Amino acid sequence: MARPDIAWLPGDGIGGEVLEAARLVLDSSGFEASYIPGDIGWEFWRKEGTPLPDRTIELLRSTDCALLGAVTSKPNADAIRELPERFRAKGVRYSGAVLRIRRMFDLYTCLRPCRAYPGNPGNRTEGIDITIFRENTEGMYSGAEWDKIPQELYNIRGMERVPRQAAITVRAVTRKASIRIAKAAFAHALEAPRAEVAPKPPTAVNGGAKHRVTAVHKANIMRATDGVFLAATREVAQGYPEVEYEEMLVDACAMQLVRDPLRFDIIVTTNLFGDILSDLCAQLVGGMGFAPSANLGDDYAMFEPSHGSAPDIAGQGIANPVAAVLSAGMMLEWLGEKDRADRVERAVAEVVREGRVRTPDMGGPDGTMAMATAIAVKLKQGT
Ligand code: IPM
Ligand code: MG
């Protein structure tokens, strides 16, 4: 792409700081783009009654992809409390900005690599290299929820098991969405080389297969929804005999990830399990400061660090920008700039390995921009 248009969405909390850091790195890589700033986040919920104004949606429609810093999201009661009376009177309800974008643009793949960069003091063990493919449009994030069960639902057989006063959320799993996330995971398994920056020990994947995909589910309890999901992953797996395939219950998976993270390679799972496991995996490789993510659709993509807006440290210039920098790197790759993306990741790996610059989450004294500058310098030196 010649000179892409990128929607630049700092959001709130530490979002602006980490994006400024990412921008320094992007510029130092020699990458040229038009960055068009957009309004998103809590401030706009409070001022305009929506965290995602229509003009921002238009901006997304008119750009090639988006880079997001972070947005605050709070439970309903807190959100309503902070809303001005004039919106409350209109019955405005909070609907998370990130979730709306994921759904609106059908960004069905949430790709979350978790790599232990050698020498990172937060690594649980060296050599961890796990890639999570999280279904990003449905599951427990269907948005179909009731504080109190509507009468009509009570007439459906099976509902007598649910207490009358219960609040309910619909877990929606389709074959279509399950097939496409599984295909994304297996296609990645075929293409992805073993990461150079965090080589896996040769024992990590058994059976001689280059990659292993683990489908994570709870089909012994959520028989209908995860039944659909597993049927889809099995079907897709058949088309990839060269990739090792296994299935694991989500609770066992959480335990195994802590016990023996090196046995994992690619995880494919439904939305909420992916959300939870990606935080767990982030912590295995140094915490949320090392957790980038890509929300990918067929026509559009949004890149964002997996962390939240961290209001407790916002404005202090101490947030670790690596997750944002790596997210920007994933954006470069998606835009067809694979070499540049690799250079960014190598620069990050090199700065981490040297250990001269470390943000507080890594046990060091350095700030956001010091880290970004160190990465930018390495990048220019062409490591
Ligand atoms: C994430 C976040 C989001 C999610 C929140 C902010 C809506 O936790 O990207 O992992 O739950 O997907
Ligand atoms: Mg999350």
Image: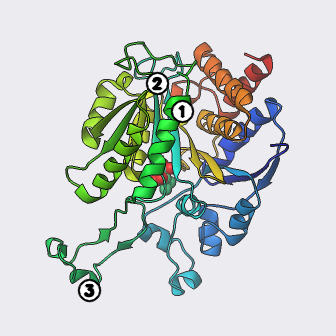
Q: Is mark 3 within 8 Å of ligand 1?
A: no
Helix or strand or loop: what does disc 3 sit on? helix
Cα distance in 3D space between marks 3 and 1: 46 Å
User: Relative to the observer, which residue lies in front, 180 or 331?
Assistant: 180
Where does the image place residue 12, in percent across and percent down from the top left? 62, 54
Q: Is residue 18 above or below residue 146?
A: above
Mark 3 — residue? 151
Pointers 2 and 1 in contact (C-beta within 8 Å): yes
Which label sits on residue 282?
Answer: none
Helix or strand or loop: what does disc 2 sit on? loop
Query: Residue shown at 42%/70% (left/top)?
Result: 77
Query: Mark 2 belongs to which amino acid?
Result: Gly
Query: Mark 1 belongs to which amino acid?
Result: Phe
Query: Mark 3 belongs to which amino acid?
Result: Gln
Mark 1 — residue? 290
Mark 2 — residue? 122
Colouring of the image: rainbow
